[in-house]
Image (spheres, coloured by chain):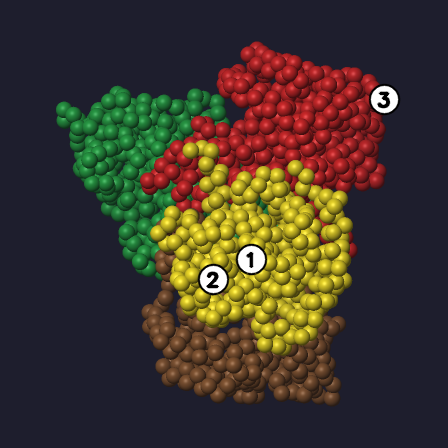
Chain colours: A red, B green, C brown, D yellow
């Protein structure tokens, strides 16, 4: 059970780290400043330029599509999930990095789905430009007004009529749907309400410019709208697409979902660990810089215990996530599912707490725009809800633990 | 040790509750909408109108200056701290309520200081209009670049020159300084750097329109600027005020601070408890409205235990705060000081956790603009830092607990 | 809502404190030494002497039957529940104190039941000698092999046959049943298995010398048997008592239980708070006596935060318990029931944690026979299970909190 | 970084598991029953027979001295620390197993010290019989009356006089010193009080039958004496041994200690993880066997979340411990030291909590002699103090984390 960096991935990790430190982080500030100036869900020329430059530089260096485990499929690195995990941690330290290396959610999940389940035509039209970073995409599953932690609640309808799917309903918190480059959405729709419970839904490709697709409003997270990609509230009113836009076949929505969410959750968790490392780094720096009661604050009262706890908890969270990635690589998604729930139920909570402790040690500065901690906190806190709240994943772990005793 | 509502305060609590529910909460939405539209640190005509109407209606009903424990001093209710605490909890449920009843921080603390330590002239110029709600005020203590949890770090200088105080330095997170009606600040300044440790600082009244007083920028909390009152970063560059603007006398800054922060912390904590009750109320409503896995989510897994824990923790936090208020009323601020640290070290943390649990039970909606929970979270979380972080107050409690064993 | 000591109870608290410190604690060591020497569930002559002397001295001073809220009923002090709570905290500091003042469980609960529900004959035969401290008693409810947290599981049968109750079944963890002075047990028995759910059980008085009553073994708690009173596993094999030994009437077992457990839980919690105060006292003493890394260990690392947290948590637990007692006094048991669950779900857990922290600060000595901490820990930990585990009481609190929202 | 079972160790793990299940666990009950019957710190003939039979059977199967990483040194398996860790987890499930396979503490640590630092003569006299399981040994470091978490407090003196070491002082909690087969102790003594701080102490071999070595009393842990090996309080009164009984050389006591405690802590932690797995196993069984409120208690309220948390926390603790073992194997003890502190500060606390949750789910049975949980709890709780309390190791982790930022 080798959880370390392989010889193959080690130089990639180094290259990614350097690229992030030297090129991406310096550009982020400019990028963010532009968000505040322009209309929120547009990209200014300068923003487009920044992204294009970074992406083509990354691609030129071969730092591209790391998530692609099938090398033949379009220039990916053919990495294992464990190898990719190490890269994901690096990317977690920066808000733009995942996109620059074409490893951003939900595009990676969508690309995986198209790779595995898409028709040739679907691949040509959507997968190819996604692999090249020319367009972006969204995944429309969560709905307002119901507890989406139980997916059987999903009620947006897809009705076959006159050789088309006619889609009606509302979706909410659709990440990336605000980005002007978002060209297509995969919509989870109820197509067979009377079918067997796990065969009622289908995943349908809906171009964002389809008539009847409307952005109702951006959803906020702690008062911020995460522009320009955003988390949008959408309305589908008789949005109509050809029948062949269904992925894999009618009624296979759940089956596809199961495949999609596994590696994505490993990526989320490893990126979150990158965030936690950054928080601990800030905590140590600040803790030695500032003095109170004649001591560096890192050494005051319970602060060293909190620093130790952060160090230990991050190390354990990383090992558990690597172990999960290893399980995917070696035993397949089905066996790995409970491991995925283990990390999803635990890692975002750990990361959130580490960042919160870092905020507290910073005092008011930790809450303010003078550090990235508040932004990091909001991202980590949201992860405790996104893709199934902690509690739902804990139930999966409990069920799996109790199962052999029946 | 009577901690309940007195007969005198019971009808006031009812009146305040009704006024908030019937008049303030409906007006808040409009008030907030105006913030987003206009320039952030100005007040629109409509906003001024809303505030003026609410305030004069409240004053007409005698719902005014509850914090004033000396009835002769200007129309206050002559309530005990315990009695006021019950009102503060009610006010905690609404963002505007404290101002509407002229009970908002930092004005209450500033008024207390002026009442107790101000000269007749200072009272006439500043206290009177504050008591009538005509102007607002700020308290400038925290500084950038140092750990303000140790007050001896404060370094903004006040130098006597030509019969005036000449003030130089920076202050940050100055609540209320963004409000266009903020007419005066009490500035904590280092006036006697070589004096005995607790006599080096003075509190000086500085009108906000004094040349050399500059608002550098609004500080954010989790990305929000809390407009229109804000938490401002200020710069004082040779800001010059007459010598008689010092309060109580040169070198008495610390002494005044000690008196000021006690009741204010009780108010903060009771308002926070109001927030927690609101969060628990939202948690219960949502928990019974939404269903997942064929059960109301309030009854799923660990949720009932979390609801019970919220109920119990809020009840304990309230009792501890009322006990602290009782201590102020019966044994005076000096004896009460350790009780004040007990609530400050504990209540904001409890309230923050309750709101966080409420967010989690709401799922994504709890993070969004569709509930008030995110805003409430940010307010409660900030309280764990404002007026001394939890850890500093815990040290005070530890010292007091260990003291008899020396 | 007066939660303080009344003028009436204050001198009693002082007298009890002095009596415990001066007479009981010095005698305890001798008493305990005798336990280890003799047969475990007998009382040596010396032990009987110690108890008799202490009890008659206490009774002479009027320190007797404090739990008796009806003064006319036999020499009790006619105290309110709040007043009694303050005394219970004092008694919690010593293992023998409750018995010395005739306030020990389960006798107090049994006496309350007899007072409220007993026939004249039952009162004459059992209540009178209990009030005078001449005999002891037990309450036999918990059974092996079922989850007793759900009382409807109770299956020991009481069958009416030939003008008698014939009792068969096993009971376990029956506190006090090992004491040679234990003369009678109140046995919860299933008498009407087909009746309405809450009318199936009856409480029947069974003299311990009834043929067919057998002590199977002493149950241990963390390897200790709590001799000489013990927690016994009992077997009833055709144990036969007259029909008039049923209390209040057939099928009223649950109804009586409800009444019994309320005040008893307040007493348990207040005694536990006495334990916690003692643990904190030991923690402070040790923390200042011992030095490591050139600092008193009380001031090392997170220790002062732990001391502060103990201080705050104990204060809150006490206030909540007093609030509960006040509710019993002023609004009756029915209204108070949810408050009783609040303290039962919370106070033993808080006390257990405080003692555990005290152990940790003591190092190995905290686990050893050189301090009382290990014994205190075991007592507090057991309280999280006795009389309904934390989790069951949390459910009661959750249900009550959610109730108004249906 | 391969943390899994190697092909070499996998069959050993299976053999050890089977041996424990089939031979040791059935014998344990008899062994324990004898403890209660006989004098506590003697071994009955039957006990000796049980141990001899098990040990010779184990040795015959090659299940012996697994801890020995140098194969040439006497029949050990030449395993890596990672490999040994997997075996230690298995051994953790049984109280006798470690001794049966000659892998028990403190013998393993003592043997390691002798192997690495012992003279040929010391090896012949003490190491050989230890390797063959003929004698047992103790390690005498902790002292009464001082905080032993700071080793510089150690004050038992070793004075060179007339060609001998003359030892005076008291030691306490000396594990294994009660066993009648304990033939030798390694005593940490202050030999050079004026030397450089880390060269003041020496480790001296003291045969237990040396005149002047006295067992004062057995120390208890939660009221139990852990007979027959025990944790003894010892007194040395002019105990005199030849000069050549010093290990490695005068003043090297600390240096030797550093080497000794590393792998030992990995073993402790892995055995503790074995305990935690056993607790979770009991929790799952009981949780599905017992029903309350018409549900298996495993599925009531927060119980599934607690089961999931146990599952996740144990997995993380194991990974962290294996990672630490890997560090010892690959980067040496010096580099591994901070990892050792990470597990020591964390694993015993995690295991203690898991066992405590298992107790709570069992109700009173969890505290009683009817499950092993109470015994397991006491063992795990003690580990949070033994070999340096959690807090001291957390400080080591904090220091190491902050170090690069100086």
Give A80 or C189, whichever is nearer the viewer.
A80
Closer to viewer: mark 3 or mark 1: 1
Q: Quick check: C38 left or right of D314? A: left
The residue that appears at 46% across and 41% down in the rendered structure is D399
Q: Quick check: A151 left or right of A347? A: right
The label number, if any, that marks residue C82 in the structure image = none
Q: Quadrant of the N terminus of chain B?
A: bottom left
- Any part of residue B86 in sight: no
**Vertical relation: D226 (above or below) C189:** above
Determine the secondary structure under disc 3.
loop
Q: Mark 2 and mark 1, same subunit?
A: yes
Q: CA distance from mark 2 to mark 1?
A: 12 Å
Rendering coords of residue D216 (x, y %): 47, 71
Q: What's the chain of the residue with tag 1? A: D
Give D311 or B278, whichever is nearer the viewer.
D311
The residue that appears at 55% across and 35% down in the rendered structure is A276
Where is residue A78, by image quadrant? top right
Q: Quick check: A400 left or right of C67? A: right
The label number, if any, that marks residue A163 in the structure image = 3
Mark 1 sits on what residue?
Answer: D122
Q: What's the chain of the residue with tag 3? A: A
Q: CA distance from mark 3 to mark 2?
A: 99 Å
Do the residues under discs 3 and 1 have CB atoms within 8 angstroms? no
Q: Mark 3 and mark 2, same subunit?
A: no
Q: CA distance from mark 3 to mark 1?
A: 91 Å
Rendering coords of residue A107 (x, y %): 69, 24
Q: What's the chain of the residue with tag 2? A: D
- Any part of residue D129 in sight: yes
Closer to viewer: mark 3 or mark 2: 2
Mark 2 sits on what residue?
Answer: D242
């Amino acid at each position: 059970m080798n959880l370390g960096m392989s010889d193959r991935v080690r130089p990639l990790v180094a290259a990614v780290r350097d690229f992030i430190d030297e090129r991406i982080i310096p550009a982020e500030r400019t990028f963010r400043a532009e968000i505040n100036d322009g209309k929120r869900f547009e990209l200014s020329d300068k923003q487009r330029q920044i992204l294009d430059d970074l992406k083509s530089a990354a691609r030129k260096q071969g730092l591209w599509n790391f998530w692609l485990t099938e090398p033949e499929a379009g220039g990916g690195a053919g990495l294992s999930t464990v190898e990719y995990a190490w890269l994901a941690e690096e990317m977690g330290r920066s808000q733009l990095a995942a996109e620059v290396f074409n490893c951003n959610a939900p595009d990676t999940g969508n690309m995986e789905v198209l790779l595995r389940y898409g028709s040739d035509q679907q691949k040509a039209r959507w997968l190819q430009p996604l692999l090249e970073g020319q367009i972006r995409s969204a995944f429309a599953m969560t709905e307002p007004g119901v507890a989406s932690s139980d997916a059987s609640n999903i009620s947006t309808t897809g009705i076959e009529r006159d050789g088309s799917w006619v889609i009606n309903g509302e979706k909410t918190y659709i990440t990336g749907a605000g980005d002007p480059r978002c060209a297509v959405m995969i919509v989870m729709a109820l197509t067979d309400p009377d079918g067997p419970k796990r065969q009622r839904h289908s995943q349908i490709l809906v171009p964002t410019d389809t008539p009847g697709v409307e952005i109702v409003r951006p959803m906020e997270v702690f008062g911020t709208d995460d522009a320009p990609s955003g988390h949008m509230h959408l309305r589908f009113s008789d949005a109509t697409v050809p029948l062949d836009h269904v992925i894999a076949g009618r009624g296979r929505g759940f089956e596809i979902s199961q495949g999609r969410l596994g590696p994505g959750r490993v990526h989320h968790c490893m990126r979150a660990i990158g965030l936690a490392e950054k928080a601990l780094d800030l905590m140590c720096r600040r803790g030695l810089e500032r003095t109170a009661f004649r001591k560096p604050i890192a050494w005051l009262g319970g602060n060293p215990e909190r620093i130790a706890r952060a160090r230990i908890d991050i190390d354990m969270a990383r090992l558990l996530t690597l172990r999960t990635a290893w399980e995917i690589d070696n035993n397949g998604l089905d066996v790995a599912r409970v491991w995925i729930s283990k990390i999803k139920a635990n890692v975002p909570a750990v990361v959130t707490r580490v960042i919160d402790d870092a905020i507290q040690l910073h005092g008011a500065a930790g809450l303010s725009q003078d550090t990235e901690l508040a932004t990091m906190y909001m991202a980590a806190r949201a992860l405790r809800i996104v893709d199934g709240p902690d509690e739902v994943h804990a139930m999966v772990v409990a069920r799996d633990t109790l199962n052999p005793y029946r």
